[in-house]
Amino acid sequence: MSAIPDFYDSELWVIRNTLKERYGEDKEIQLADSEIRMRPDDRVLTECPAVYWEAGETHFILFKTGQERYRCQFYYRGYQQYGTGITEFDNIGDCVLTLLRTQADYQAKENG
């Protein structure tokens, strides 16, 4: 059992509303558990709650790494994984917005 608390309703509300604002419709989110390294040199994986959603061909995942601590990434295939350049956020709204902006910038660059 993880020592990291599950997402609170208020955190899920921020995610859902930010996604609705971005896409103009409700996006289905899925709650999951994930095992990640809390630090790059960790040998042991830590279980933490996660939120997953898709938009087109893009998959998004947001990890809760502690009380008001979040990490995120988006990917297309297993070998096409991208982060925001920020290791950890202390505000879930900033985390979601930065993730969406980073993905939109990446997509715009790919599309020329």
Image: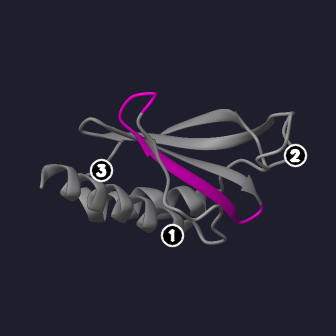
Which three-letter amino acid code belongs to the residue tagged 3? Asp
> Which amino acid type is marked by label 2?
Ala
Camera-nearest residue between 23 and 65: 65
List the residue tagged with mark 1: 93
Tag on residue 20?
none
Residue 36 shown in magenta: no
Which residue occupies 67% across, 34% down? 34
Closer-to-camera residue (88/5): 88
Residue 55 lies, in percent from the top left, at 29, 42
Q: Is residue 68 left or right of residue 16?
A: right
Classify 10 Å Cα crowding around label 2: few (below 14), some (14-19), many (20 and above): few
Q: Mark 3 or mark 1, which has the lower sequence index? A: 3
Image depth: mark 3 or mark 1 in front: 1
Label 3, on which residue? Answer: 26
Q: Residues within 10 Å of mark 1 (few under 14, many from 20)?
A: some
Q: What separation in Å lies between label 2 and label 3 (alpha carbons)?
A: 31 Å
Task: Mark 2 vs mark 3: give the one in front.
Answer: 2
User: The residue tagged with tag 2: helix, strand or loop?
Assistant: loop
What residue is shown at x 44% (from left), y 67% (from top)? 98
Closest to the observer: 53 or 85? 85
Residue with the mark numbered 2: 3
